[in-house]
Amino acid sequence: MNNNLSKHWDNIHLQYNSTYDGWLDKYIKLFNKDDVILELGCGRAYCSKYLFDNGYKYVIASDFSEVALKIVTRDNQDIKTMAIDISKPLPFASNFINIMIADLSLHYFDDLTTRKILNEIYRVLSIGGYLIARVNSVNTLLTIPQEYNELGKNFYYDGKMYKRFFSKEDFDILFEKFKFYSLSEKKMDRYAKTKILWEFCVRK
Ligand SMILES: C[S@@+](CC[C@H](N)C(=O)[O-])C[C@H]1O[C@@H](n2cnc3c(N)ncnc32)[C@H](O)[C@@H]1O
């Protein structure tokens, strides 16, 4: 595990909570009740909880923050949790997971690491399986504070963590192997200021 970063996230998880905002509702029709569903970077796992409460019993909530996983177990004892650092190879056999959910957890990595993560997601997804996710859009950069250090194209360090912002062209390149079910830009007001995000659903 990347200790400094996961400890940083531990502190955030002790302070902040969020609630499910309905974003997965439109994808539920793609799921089967016996699908194996893996949430990556689950935080307090409101997506996993939403799916579990709606009858999807094979949900695994994963994060590299031990604090986040402890909170998930404390609040939802029936949801399976796993400590997974998504910048490392995923601890699953190829084609094992039917659905992967990643809400605001795939945009913390440099380009090479992002490519490795997406290769791993592709490997582990079953044929026809879906990755459904939201990531920062470059259009949020308009509100990026000046103290952010630009380390590469659309890749920043704010003194505590790294942040990547995705352009439409990034999707064309990074998700070349996947088939697109949907991709659209949305606004989110969750963290005090408005963020522009890409919401997407891709298929293996
Ligand atoms: C903005 S939070 C989103 C949490 C949750 N998905 C939500 O929307 O409430 C980003 C999450 O990614 C997790 N995360 C960041 N880097 C990670 C990594 N390398 N491996 C696994 N999880 C990571 C953090 O611990 C955090 O829970």
Image (cartoon, rainbow, N blue to C red):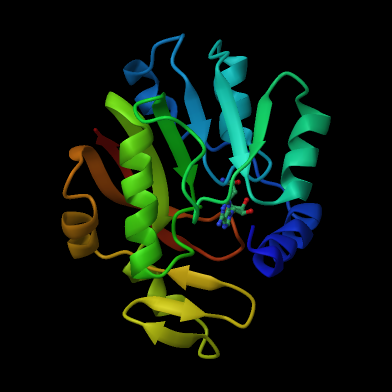
Q: Is residue 59 above or below residue 105?
A: above
Q: Which quadrant would the C terminus be assigned to in this image? A: top left
Residue 143 x/y as whole percent: 46, 77
Q: Nearer the viewer, residue 163 or 119?
A: 119
Q: Is residue 190 above or below residue 51?
A: below
Q: Is residue 49 left or right of residue 144?
A: right
Q: In terms of image quadrants, where is residue 29? A: top left
Q: In terms of image quadrants, where is residue 142? A: bottom left
Q: Is residue 116 left or right of residue 183?
A: right
Rendered residue at 64%/57% (across/down): 1
Residue 144 x/y as whole percent: 47, 79
Q: Nearer the viewer, residue 188 or 31?
A: 31
Q: In terms of image quadrants, where is residue 124? A: top left
Q: Is residue 187 above or below residue 178?
A: below
Rendered residue at 55%/22% (across/down): 51
Q: Is residue 15 left or right of residue 31?
A: right
Residue 191 x/y as whole percent: 60, 60
